[in-house]
Amino acid sequence: MIIMLNPRHVTASAPGKTILFGEHAVVYGKPAIAAAVDRRAYVSIRKREDLRTHVNVEELGVSGFLNLDKGSIEIEKGENNRKGILKYVLRALRKINAEDGLEVTINIDIPIGAGLGSSAAVTVATIQAAAVFNDIKLTRDEISKLAHQVELEVQGAASPIDTTLSTHGGIIYLSRDAEETITLDIDSEIPIVIGYTSKRGNTGKLVESVRLKMETHPQVMIPLFNSMEALTNGAREALTNGDHEMIGEFMNINHGLLDAIGVNTQELSKMVFEARKTGALGSKLTGAGGGGSIIAYCPGKIQEVVNCINEFENAFKVNISREGVRLE
Ligand code: MEV
């Protein structure tokens, strides 16, 4: 079949993120601190000559046809555990009432399923690309809100942290109950290394497992979340004052609390402890856990920690992305 493509096309991109403090607690109205990273998802939209909507997600080896009108997905290729991304794309396109007849090409330069917000980045970039393609002007706040609605619909429970970072960029303190997002004025060269395993975590399932624990033992879980709140607030001050030792210490405590709520794994712990042994002042799992990533705070030891983790997993130095969603 020959597909005639209209020459008009739009590409938008949005960054992934890493959570420095407060993941999981943020689902229970506690504050969190997170940074957008300079790894992006790119979404291009073109008109097709037929009235079908086709999506290709290159790095996942996933493609399929969406029916925007009915809200259905017909998978063309892709492994079962990788097809979920099409649900985000479908809902994102429907949020702005896009009409069928689109060719959507997605490239993800963010380690996928590693807790680095690749699905939020795809969602935000899809909303922006589709809005511009349809001559709809959205503010960043509107994009962020729509993208959060998409995450809620697909995942069941989700805080606005990933979608906020992908939309706005920078380093953000998300206040209690996410009522306010405050951009922290911090040197964007904060010395952080990300290590990630090939084993993926499933955010939806992990959030659900924590919810069940919360339901069963609220008297145990609530104090843990209160501690996370206190350390996130302390870390905000330490980050603003550049107090390296304190930042590291809060990360270590946060890792222990995340272990206590059941989202740590042996692979994550190995990276966390090897990073500390190599000179990181602090390290913790980041994001949903259950696989995925860790962050290590490594003033003066960035390359050493990257090299150490690269011996048994994957690691890179984080550069903060000041820029959120943008048109390419
Ligand atoms: C996932 O990146 C972060 C979690 O706190 C879930 C959420 O905030 O939606 C685990």
Image: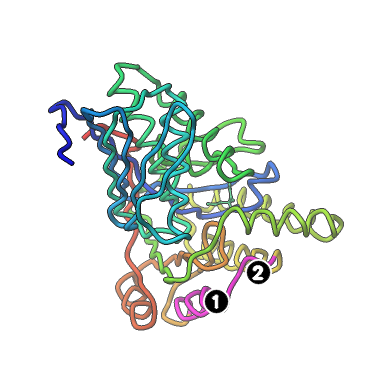
Rendered location of residue 61, percent (x, y):
32, 58
Rendered location of residue 301, percent (x, y):
35, 72
Q: Amino acid at mark 1?
A: Ser
Query: Which residue is rendered at x = 53% and y = 65% of the image?
Result: 285
Q: Quadrant of the C terminus?
A: top left
On screen, residue 120 versus residue 189, left or right, reads right
Disc sitting over residue 259 in the figure = 2
Dot 1 surroundings within 10 Å: few (below 14), some, or many (20 or more)?
some
Disc sitting over residue 295 in the figure = none
Could you tell which of marks 1 and 2 lies nearer the N-terminus? 2
Nearer-the-camera pick, 232 or 28: 28
Circles 1 and 2 in contact, beta carbons < 8 Å: yes
Query: Which residue is rendered at x = 53% and y = 47% of the image?
Result: 33
Residue 145 vertical placement versus 23 (above, below): above
Rendered location of residue 310, percent (x, y):
33, 77
Residue topped by disc 1: 269
Please say whether residue 308 is one of the residues in the magenta stretch: no
Give the extent of the magenta segment.
262-276
Query: Which residue is rendered at x = 61% and y = 35% of the image?
Result: 178
Callout 1 secondary element: helix
On screen, residue 10 versus residue 122, left or right, reads left
Please say whether residue 269 is one of the residues in the magenta stretch: yes
**What is the number of callouts on the image?**
2
Picture quadrant of residue 7: top left
Residue 114 vertical placement versus 48 (above, below): below
Q: Dominant secondary structure of the magenta stretch?
A: helix
| Label 2 lies in ligand 1 vicinity (Cβ under 8 Å) | no
Residue 267 vertical placement versus 120 (above, below): below
Query: Which residue is rendered at x = 42% and y = 71% of the image?
Result: 198
